[in-house]
Image: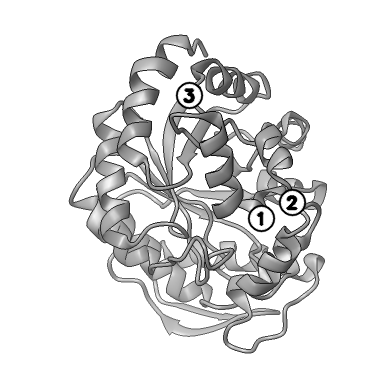
Amino acid sequence: MKLGYFLSSEEHGPRELVRNAKMAEEHGFESLWISDHYHPWNDEQGQSPFVWGTIGALSETVSLPITTAVTCPTVRIHPAVIAQAAATAAVQTEGRFVLGVGSGEALNEHVLGDRWPSADVRLEMLEEAIGLIRTLHQGDEVTHHGKHYTVENARVYTVPERPVPIYVSAFGPKAVRLAARCGDGYVSVGPAGDLVEKYRAEGGRGPAQSGLKVCYAASEEDAVATAHRVWPNDGLPGELAQVLPTPKHFEQASELVTPEMIAKAIPCGPDPEKYAEKVKEFAEAGFDELHVQQIGPQQQEFFEFWAKEVVPLIDV
């Protein structure tokens, strides 16, 4: 299983993201995820730069593959615009770019005042958007009058030599079937082995990627406090992440999340065995790539800890 680093656009500004990516490459990580948000999940996280500008800077700084985790190409940004952005990113990175897509969250997608559709409609929109992006990436003039999107006389002139791979995020059976049917790979979070199995059973043959949040600090107590302060939303259940519309709503819901819940879900503190065991869970679940996100400001300390103490324990 390949190990990459997850660049959190919710916690870091564009210059910090580029710096973190450079440290990730220097400390042996093999690839990058980068989140694509309009808002952070809560005000404590405090950032949300435009991902496409950051990717341009990353392309000049590191040589690692980059995947958006994930872009929603359906409501806030039209798929024709995402097609152009992804094609440019692929050219900038000399083919090392993967467009990760998903059906999105109201948190980011309702900001223009559009209605937030039901889950089934969002998946229907996502499938049409993926097809339109693939067509535009062929470099020909496209006119498309679909159920959800209209494009007239559109042509993406700057296209990469090879088609941009599109990986699809999925957390339920219907979305997993869509990922297997339409995607070049599968994106998830957490060691959800049953979903990987379903992706394969439905015909999905591309890489399966996932993400893992961790919080290194000199003491477990400090690490848990940081993780609970910055990412309490990680403990929210069900579909809340898809339907709550503002960071303030996430803050209100996160009042139900205790430090103990975060400590159970996120490896925290200075014990490298915790991190290695969690990585092993993802490997055993069938994931091909895992992207690790350090929560909080101690990025340099984390990279040194990971390279010196965690990596020697990992055998995946």
Q: Mark 2: give few (<14), some (14-19) or many (20+) Cα within 10 Å.
A: some
- The part of the image, by quadrant, that contains residue 145 is bottom right
Dot 3 falls on a residue whose secondary structure is loop
Residue bearing the label numbered 2: 257
Q: Nearer the viewer, mark 1 or mark 3?
A: 3
Q: Amino acid at mark 2?
A: Val
Q: Is residue 124 left or right of residue 77?
A: right
Residue under the image location 27 percent in, 34 percent down: 25
Q: Nearer the viewer, mark 2 or mark 1?
A: 2
Dot 2 falls on a residue whose secondary structure is loop
Residue bearing the label numbered 3: 270
Question: Which of the two residues, 86 or 147, is positioned nearer the viewer here?
Answer: 86
Q: Earlier in the sequence, mark 3 or mark 2?
A: 2
Q: Is residue 69 left or right of residue 161?
A: right
What is the x, y in percent for residue 175?
Answer: 74, 52
User: Which residue is situated farthest in the left direction here?
Assistant: 60
Label 3 to label 2: alpha-carbon separation: 23 Å
Residue bearing the label numbered 1: 233
Q: Is 258 rendered above or below residue 45?
A: above
Q: Mark 3: give few (<14), some (14-19) or many (20+) Cα within 10 Å.
A: some
What is the x, y in percent for residue 10?
Answer: 47, 60
Q: Is residue 174 left or right of residue 22?
A: right
Q: Earlier in the sequence, mark 2 or mark 1?
A: 1
Residue under the image location 47 percent in, 41 percent down: 293
Q: Amino acid at mark 1?
A: Asn
- The part of the image, by quadrant, that contains residue 255 is bottom right
Question: Which of the two residues, 127 or 212, is positioned nearer the viewer here?
Answer: 212
